[in-house]
Image (tube, grey):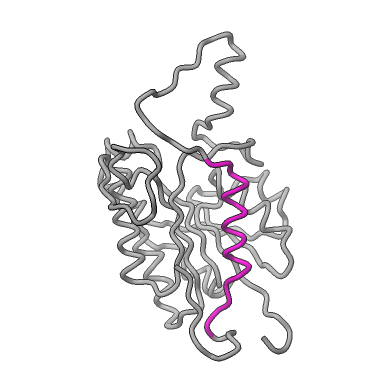
């Protein structure tokens, strides 16, 4: 690519969550990245803003789409969007299926990206290994999706929407994510921290024995996302003028 390399604008949707905060911390140290995130609460976590002063925060509602136009006006069209936002507790999804579908199927986010009328944005969607039926171990990407719970069903619906509507996307099906605490503690129970708390009280830790899971270290997930981010070049920036795709 001739000339000076363009800075990339990266938007982390759900950046105040567990994976989102780790991604923001790592992204803020990468050259030529302008980083922003969305949060659903009335105010973003103050410790996050104080620790990462270069990162911009925007309030947005993933269900209604409120707040995305403000991002367009102030931050601009992002070159990379990482959707970490989710209603990810299976029990909560079972109790309120409409809320699970409204939150986990990013219709408003996809429509917002389509409104730019170009193919300059890469959407990285976080999904789950719970899109599979769960009757065997070590599923492969090409295996049929057949979720048995509402969380998995909502994530399959999200994947189908993105495949149908988006030209440039990457879908990452993750299992349980573990690792160190975040800059601003999150409300969700974390595997390592939960085990440490139980064991420190002298109690026994009980695990499921009827599942095959492959926990993923959070910083490995971050590395994969950053690799996709660094190698993505918008269509208008391609040497030959052809479209750049990632899927």
Q: Is residue 134 above or below residue 36?
A: above
Question: Which percent across, then down, holds residue 139?
Answer: 37, 46
The one of 188 and 231 positioned closer to us in this rendering: 231
Is 52 covered by the magenta stretch?
Answer: no
Question: Which percent across, then down, holds residue 42?
Answer: 51, 49
Q: Is residue 106 left or right of residue 54?
A: left
Is 217 covered by the magenta stretch?
Answer: yes
Q: Residue at x 30, y 62 (%)?
A: 160
Quadrant of the image containing the C terminus: bottom left
Q: Is residue 27 above or below residue 184?
A: below
Q: Is residue 215 above or below residue 164?
A: above
Question: Which percent across, then down, holds residue 20?
Answer: 56, 50
Question: Which percent across, then down, holds residue 117?
Answer: 42, 83
Q: Residue at x 35, y 43 (%)?
A: 130
The one of 207 and 158 positioned closer to us in this rendering: 207
Q: Quadrant of residue 151?
A: top left
Q: Which residues are magenta?
A: 216-235
Q: Is residue 117 left or right of residue 54?
A: left
The one of 20 and 225 positioned closer to us in this rendering: 225
Q: Is residue 204 left or right of residue 87?
A: right
């Amino acid at each position: 690519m001739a000339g000076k390399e363009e800075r990339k604008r990266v938007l982390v949707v759900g950046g105040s969550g567990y994976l989102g905060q780790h991604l923001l911390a790592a992204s803020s140290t990468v050259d030529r990245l302008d980083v922003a995130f969305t949060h659903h609460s009335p105010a973003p976590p103050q410790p996050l803003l104080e620790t990462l002063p270069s990162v911009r925060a925007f309030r947005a509602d993933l269900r209604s789409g409120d707040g995305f136009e403000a991002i367009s006006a102030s931050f601009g069209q992002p070159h990379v969007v990482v959707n970490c936002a989710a209603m990810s507790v299976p029990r909560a999804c079972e109790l309120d299926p409409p809320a699970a579908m409204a939150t986990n199927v990013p219709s408003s986010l996809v429509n917002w990206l389509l409104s730019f009328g170009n193919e300059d944005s890469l959407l990285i969607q976080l999904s789950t290994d719970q899109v599979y039926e769960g009757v065997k171990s070590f599923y492969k990407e090409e295996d049929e999706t057949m979720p048995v719970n509402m969380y998995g069903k909502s994530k399959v619906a999200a994947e189908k929407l993105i495949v149908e509507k988006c030209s440039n996307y990457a879908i990452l099906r993750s299992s349980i994510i573990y690792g160190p605490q975040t800059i601003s503690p999150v409300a969700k129970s974390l595997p390592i921290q939960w085990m440490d708390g139980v064991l420190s009280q002298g109690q026994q830790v009980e695990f499921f024995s009827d599942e095959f899971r492959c926990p993923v270290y959070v910083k490995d997930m971050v590395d994969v996302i950053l690799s996709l981010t660094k190698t993505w070049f918008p269509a208008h920036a391609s040497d030959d003028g052809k479209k750049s795709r990632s899927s």
